[in-house]
C-alpha cells in the first residue's frame, strides 16, 4: 500500500514537472518570438547604418563624407532651395515672363556643360601637388561669394543677378565634378559597389532636397525671395572645409614642367576622343542626351499657373515648398526601390519601362491643368501631391541607371574627365530641354497671366517623352556589373604611364585607389 502511494506521488510529481516544463517552454517561445520581432524592427533602422559602414570600410570614410556633403548639401539642399527661391525671384522681384525665365535658367547649365573643363583641370592640373582638394576650396569660395552678392546687394540689374546665379551654379558644378571623379574611379575599381555608390548619391541628394524644399517656402515668405538667397552661402562653407579635410595623397612633384603638362593634357583629350568613338560608348551617350533634350521643360509655365489665384489653384509659398518637399521624400522612395529591387536589371529593360512610365505619368499634369481632377472630386492639393510623388519616383528610377551606365563607360586614367564629358552631354540635353520648352511656351503665348494653351504645351511634351522609346536600341543590354569597355582602352593608344602630374593611364590596385581617397 505504501509502495502504491509512493508510486502515485512520483507520477504526480512527474506530471507537475512536465507541466511546468511545458509552461517554461511556451514562455521561452513567446520571449523568443518577441525578441525576434523587436530585432527585426531594430534591424530596419540599423540596416542603413550598417550599409554606410560597409561602404566606408570598402572605400574610405572621407570619400563617403564627401558624397554626403556634395550630394546632400551642395546638390540636394542648394539645388532645391535655389530652384524655388529663384523662381520667386524672377517672378516677384524681376517680374519676368515664364518663357524668358526658362531661357535664363538654361544659362544656369553653362557651368555644367563645362564639366569636361573642370574634369581636365582636376585630372591634369594639380595645385601644390593635390588633384581634388583645391578644387573643392575653389568651388566653395565661388559659390559663397556669388550667393552673398545677389542676396545683399539690392536693386540688381537682371544681367548681374543672372551672372551671380551662374556663379552659384558654377560652384555646384565644380564640386560635383570633383567628387564624381572619385566616384568614377571607385566604380571602375570596385565594380560591385557602383550601384551602391549611386544609391548613396541619390539618397543624399533626395534627403538634402527634402530639407531645401521644406524650408524654401517659409524663408521666401518671411525674408523675401532676395533675402532668402543668403542661405545659399551656407553649403559652400562646408564645401570649402571639405577641401581641407578630405584625405588625398600629395604628389611628390610640386613643380612639374609646363611642357609635360601640355603633353598630359593632349593625352587626356586624345583619350576622350578615342573612347567616345567606340559604339558601346557613343550610342548610350546619344540616348541619354536625346531622352533629356526631347523631354521639353514646361516647369516655369506650370509654376506661374500654380501660383496664380485666378487662372490656377493659387498655391502659397509655403504650399509650393511643402509640395516639393513631399516630392523629395518620394524621390527617396524611388532610390530605395531601385536599390532594393532594380539595380541588377539590364540597362535596356529598366530604361525602357522607366521611360514608358515617365511619358504616361506626364498625363497627370494634363489632367491637373484642365482641372479634370475637380470633375472627379479630387481636391487640387491632394492631386498635385499625388502627381508630384509619382513623377519623382519614376524620374529617380529613370535617372539612377543612366548615371550608373555613365560610370561604366569611363576608362581608367581619365575617369574624372570622361565622366565629366558624359555629364556635360546630359547637361546640354537639359539646357536644350529648358530652351526648347521656353520656345514652345513663347510660340503658344503662355505668359504671366495667359495660360490658355498651357495644356497643349504639356501634351506636346508628353508625346515627345513617349517618342523617345524608339531610341531605346541605343542602350546596351548589359547588366550593371558587366564590363562595357576594355579596361586597357587607353593603354593600346598611349605610351604615357602613371606620373606625378595626375593623369593615370594604367590600372591601379584596389588598395591604391582606397588610399588615394
Image (cartoon, rainbow, N blue to C red):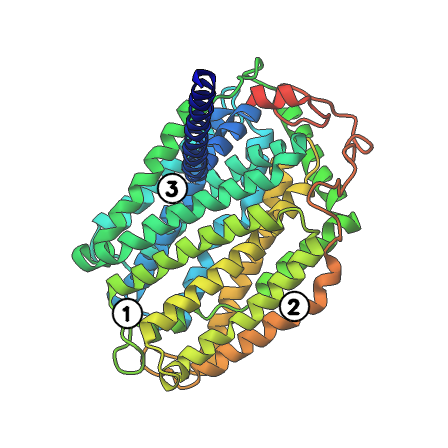
SS at circle 1: loop
Q: Residue at x 48, y 64 (%)?
A: 391
> In the current view of this chain or complex, which residue is farthest to the top?
252
Marks 1/3 in contact by CB < 8 Å: the verdict is no
Q: Is residue 32 left or right of residue 408?
A: left
- Compared to 460, does 280 lie above or below? above
Residue position marked by numbered label 1 in the rendering = 95
Q: CA distance from mark 1 to mark 3?
A: 29 Å
Residue position marked by numbered label 2 in the rendering = 468
Q: Nearer the viewer, residue 61 or 223?
A: 61
Q: Check residue 73 in the rendering and tell me which mark sits there, or answer none.
A: 3
Q: Is residue 508 left or right of residue 316?
A: right
Q: Quadrant of the N terminus?
A: top left
Q: Residue at x 68, y 51 (%)?
A: 345
Q: CA distance from mark 2 to mark 1?
A: 35 Å
Q: Residue at x 71, y 28 (%)?
A: 505
Q: Earlier in the sequence, mark 1 or mark 3?
A: 3
> In the current view of this chain or complex, which residue is farthest to the right?
492
Q: CA distance from mark 3 to mark 2?
A: 32 Å
Q: Quadrant of residue 291?
A: bottom right
Q: Quadrant of residue 507?
A: top right
* Residue 308 image offset from top left, x and y in percent: 28, 76
* Residue 409 image offset from top left, x and y in percent: 69, 43
SS at circle 2: helix
* Residue 173 image offset from top left, x and y in percent: 47, 44
Viewer-nearest of discs 2 and 1: 2
Residue 342 appears in the figure: yes
Q: Residues within 10 Å of mark 1 (few under 14, many from 20)?
A: few
- Compared to 246, does 71 lie above or below? below
Q: Quadrant of the C terminus?
A: top right
Viewer-nearest of discs 1 and 3: 3
* Residue 449 image offset from top left, x and y in percent: 31, 81
Amino acid at each position: 500500500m505504501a509502495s502504491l502511494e509512493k508510486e502515485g506521488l512520483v507520477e504526480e510529481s512527474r506530471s507537475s514537472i512536465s507541466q511546468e516544463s511545458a509552461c517554461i517552454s511556451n514562455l521561452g517561445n513567446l520571449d523568443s518570438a518577441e525578441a525576434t520581432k523587436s530585432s527585426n524592427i531594430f534591424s530596419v533602422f540599423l540596416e542603413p547604418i550598417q550599409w554606410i559602414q560597409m561602404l566606408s570600410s570598402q572605400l574610405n570614410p572621407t570619400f563617403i563624407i564627401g558624397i554626403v556633403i556634395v550630394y546632400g548639401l551642395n546638390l540636394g539642399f542648394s539645388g532645391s532651395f535655389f530652384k524655388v527661391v529663384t523662381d520667386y525671384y524672377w517672378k516677384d522681384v524681376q517680374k519676368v515672363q515664364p518663357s524668358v525665365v526658362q531661357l535664363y535658367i538654361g544659362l544656369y547649365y553653362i557651368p555644367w556643360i563645362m564639366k569636361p573643363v573642370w574634369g581636365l583641370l582636376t585630372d591634369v592640373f594639380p595645385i601644390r601637388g593635390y588633384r581634388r582638394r583645391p578644387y573643392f576650396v575653389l568651388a566653395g569660395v565661388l559659390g559663397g561669394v556669388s550667393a552673398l552678392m545677389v542676396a545683399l546687394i539690392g536693386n540688381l540689374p537682371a544681367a548681374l543677378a543672372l551672372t551671380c546665379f551662374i556663379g552659384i551654379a558654377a560652384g555646384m558644378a565644380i564640386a560635383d565634378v570633383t567628387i564624381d571623379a572619385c566616384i568614377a574611379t571607385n566604380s571602375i575599381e570596385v565594380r560591385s559597389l557602383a550601384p551602391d555608390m549611386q544609391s548613396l548619391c541619390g539618397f543624399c541628394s533626395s534627403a538634402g532636397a527634402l530639407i531645401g524644399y521644406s524650408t524654401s517656402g517659409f524663408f521666401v515668405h518671411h525674408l523675401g525671395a532676395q533675402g532668402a538667397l543668403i542661405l545659399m552661402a551656407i553649403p559652400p562653407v562646408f564645401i570649402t572645409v571639405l577641401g581641407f579635410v578630405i584625405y588625398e595623397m600629395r604628389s611628390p612633384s610640386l613643380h612639374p614642367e609646363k611642357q609635360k603638362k601640355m603633353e598630359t593634357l593632349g593625352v587626356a583629350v586624345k583619350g576622350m576622343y578615342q573612347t567616345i568613338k567606340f559604339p558601346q560608348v557613343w550610342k548610350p551617350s546619344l540616348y541619354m542626351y536625346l531622352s533629356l533634350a526631347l523631354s521639353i521643360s514646361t516647369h516655369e509655365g506650370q509654376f506661374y499657373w500654380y501660383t496664380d489665384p485666378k487662372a490656377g489653384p493659387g498655391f502659397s509659398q509655403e504650399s509650393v515648398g511643402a509640395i516639393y518637399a513631399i516630392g523629395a521624400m518620394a524621390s527617396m522612395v524611388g532610390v530605395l526601390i531601385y536599390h532594393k529591387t532594380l539595380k541588377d536589371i539590364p540597362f535596356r529593360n529598366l530604361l525602357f519601362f522607366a521611360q514608358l512610365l515617365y511619358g504616361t505619368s506626364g498625363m497627370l499634369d494634363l489632367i491637373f491643368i484642365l482641372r479634370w481632377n475637380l470633375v472627379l472630386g479630387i481636391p487640387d492639393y491632394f492631386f498635385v501631391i499625388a502627381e508630384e510623388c509619382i513623377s519623382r519616383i519614376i524620374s529617380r528610377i529613370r535617372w539612377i541607371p543612366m548615371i550608373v551606365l555613365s560610370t561604366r563607360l569611363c576608362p581608367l586614367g581619365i575617369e574624372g574627365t570622361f565622366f565629366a564629358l558624359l555629364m556635360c552631354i546630359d547637361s546640354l540635353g537639359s539646357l536644350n530641354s529648358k530652351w526648347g520648352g521656353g520656345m514652345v511656351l513663347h510660340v503658344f503665348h503662355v505668359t504671366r497671366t495667359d495660360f490658355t494653351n498651357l495644356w497643349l504645351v504639356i501634351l506636346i511634351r508628353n508625346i515627345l517623352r513617349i517618342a523617345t522609346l524608339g531610341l531605346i536600341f541605343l542602350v546596351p543590354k548589359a547588366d550593371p556589373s558587366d564590363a562595357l569597355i576594355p579596361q586597357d582602352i587607353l593603354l593600346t593608344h598611349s605610351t604615357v604611364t602613371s606620373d606625378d602630374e595626375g593623369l593615370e593611364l594604367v590600372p591601379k590596385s584596389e588598395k591604391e585607389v582606397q588610399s588615394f581617397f
